[in-house]
Amino acid sequence: MTRRSRLRVDGHSNGDAGTSRVVDLGTWPAIDELALSLDRRALYRRRERAIRLYLEGATDSLIQAACGISRGQTYRLLTERCLKQHPDGHVYGWRGLLPHARVKSYQRTAPLELNAWSGGAVGALQWLFESPAGRGLEERLRERILGKRGELEVSRRPRMAVFRWFLAELRERGVERRGEWPFNVEKRGYVTLTRYIDRVLAESPARARQLVGGQEAVRKARSGDGTRRPMMAPFERVECDAHKLDARMMVLVPSPHGGTEPRMIHRLWVVVLIDVASRAVIGYHLSLRRECAAEDVLRAVRCALLPWTPRELQFSGEAYVPGAGLPSHRLPQLTGACWNEFSVDGALANTCARVEGVLRDVVGAKIIKPQDPSSYSCRRGKDDRPFIESFFGHLAAGGFHRLATTTGSSPADKRGADPEAAAFATQFQFEYAEELLDTLIANYNATPHSGLGYRTPLEQLERLMAEGMSPPRTADSAAVCRMVSVRKLCTLLGGIKSGRRPHFNFANARYSAEWLCLRTDLLGQSFWLHLDNEDDARYAAVSTQQGLFLGLVRAAPPWHRTPHSLYVRKAIRALEKRRLLHLASHGDAVEALIRYAEAAPGSKLPVHPAYLEARRILQQHAERLAGESMVSRASHAEPAAADAATPGTPETRQSTTFPPMRRAQQW
């Protein structure tokens, strides 16, 4: 670098009357000399030395002696190469001195004539654009490649489609009839055109991302590299997302001929909440539906606010590693800990008014939506919520992808395997998936993390809490228990003259009670009906709009016998409208759903999701009445049955498959 960084270049003394130009060597892009070969490096250094001497005002003899280059040649290197504009918008600078570096595209001046070997067509496309037959062709071709200006919705345009349009356009202009290029060469100029397409796309990288990569590439380009992410405190921001389990599983249903029959079910979803600061999973929920709903998100949020306890496992007694669990188990003071920000994607289940209201009123958190400036999230963008997407990769690679029933992340991951056949052969039930998922999440929190200095997420959370951080606020336990419940303003119907019993129409069912028969003064008024237990829609609480609690009402037949959720009721009503179920006036709607799902042939559609939901509710109801889990109850019953029964008796042939559906219904 010379002492003077800004020098003026005047017209050359040998008759060049060029205008004066200011050269700032400090703004010239640098190059890596060591990347060049020895001979090219020596040539480059001579050229660079000549440029510096010329700008310092050295004479022709001095430049010739020091660099072996004349002053006139140095001037041409400076003006015709170094000061030329690069496609990136800057001058070539030192890049223009690189040996064999082209700074000007080839311009054909001679007429286009092919030799005997079909050669001599260099620059044919540019020659075609400048010929009378190609008037306006280049503009139309660029428009065909990039789309019209202002066009928002861009469809992908494959090269072959552009090539076909190009040939058709030339035929209309009479080029083929005259036998001119590209119709006089073997590939019709396809290679030349594809190179031109690549050059046009390179000049418009934003448009190229839309055309080549699609919306996923556009989203990835908008996301940052994570270096500007703010430092988060524990429970300041929580990421939430849903992940479909990459495994086939089945359910055993009672057979009318005795025993059980395996039925394949749809793939399940898991909704996970992860703390950004500590990378710890604070809550999750396994959804039994085909698509996640707002209720699944709320159940995952409630799991994060309630204390977690290890499960009683049936496939292993030592599946949990030492220290495994959720934060509420390792640090009891974090039970019910609330967070400030809830980062989600654009799915409606995450951003609907029901979820937003519960997070605002119970948790005190704000939903960070994709359109928020402070958001890093985008629908299905793996780079926007990196921590939870990284966890999903760990969950798949370290768990479900290791099973014989895995479907993999793509069809190519199957590698010729048959997941459905493996599920039937191993009888991998979705109850096993529940236990496996719980152990994988609990063990993840106790596994060293490379992004945390090889501390476990729970150790990182414990360390951050011990550094004098103020404890997070906690949610009200009663509000947490009610956060998934449903409330609706209903009118009390009935009449004194007709003698019609007072009742409420709520969630596709009629609710009434004995005490309502004595309150004819309430007819025609509106009251709040809410389910305290979302898994038992048989009962609803009634309160006035002023907040006074009046009592409980019970659903009328056929919804009065078996515990069920509103989702199960809605599914039953949908099946009834399709004439697949026939509900008796004094029957049991849930029992009808169970019979319908269990009687369907195995070759038909997978088991209805509402059937799985009904099984889960009946199992929880049976465990609540029995005071112990089905696993422990089955383990206690097996030794007694083995002592009482002799080989060959029916007792020894009885299936002990978990969970026993009929046993859950008997409680």
Image: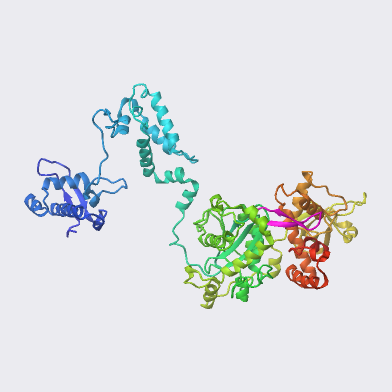
Position of 331 with respect to 494 (left or right) is left
- Give 503 or 379, whichever is nearer the viewer: 379
Quarter of the figure with the C terminus: bottom right
Relative image position of residue 518 (x, y in whole percent): 90, 60
Position of 241 with respect to 206 (left or right) is right
Magenta part of the chain: 248-266
Position of 182 with respect to 316 (left or right) is left
- Magenta-drawn stretch contains 472: no
Residue at the far left: name it. Answer: 61
Residue at the far top: name it. Answer: 177
Q: In this rendering, does residue 626 appear at all? A: yes
Position of 605 with respect to 643 (left or right) is left
- Give 63 or 643, whichever is nearer the viewer: 643
Q: How many marks?
A: 0
Q: In this rendering, does residue 535 appear at all? A: no
Quarter of the figure with the N terminus: bottom left
Relative image position of residue 335 (x, y in whole percent): 63, 72
- Quadrant for residue 652, please give it: bottom right
Relative image position of residue 166 (x, y in whole percent): 40, 31
Residue at the far front: name it. Answer: 647
Against 552, residue 167 (above or below) is above
Against 462, residue 612 (above or below) is above
- Magenta-drawn stretch contains 256: yes
- Give 288 or 411, whichever is nearer the viewer: 411
- Quadrant for residue 440, please give it: bottom right
Against 639, residue 40 (above or below) is above
Relative image position of residue 193 (x, y in whole percent): 37, 36
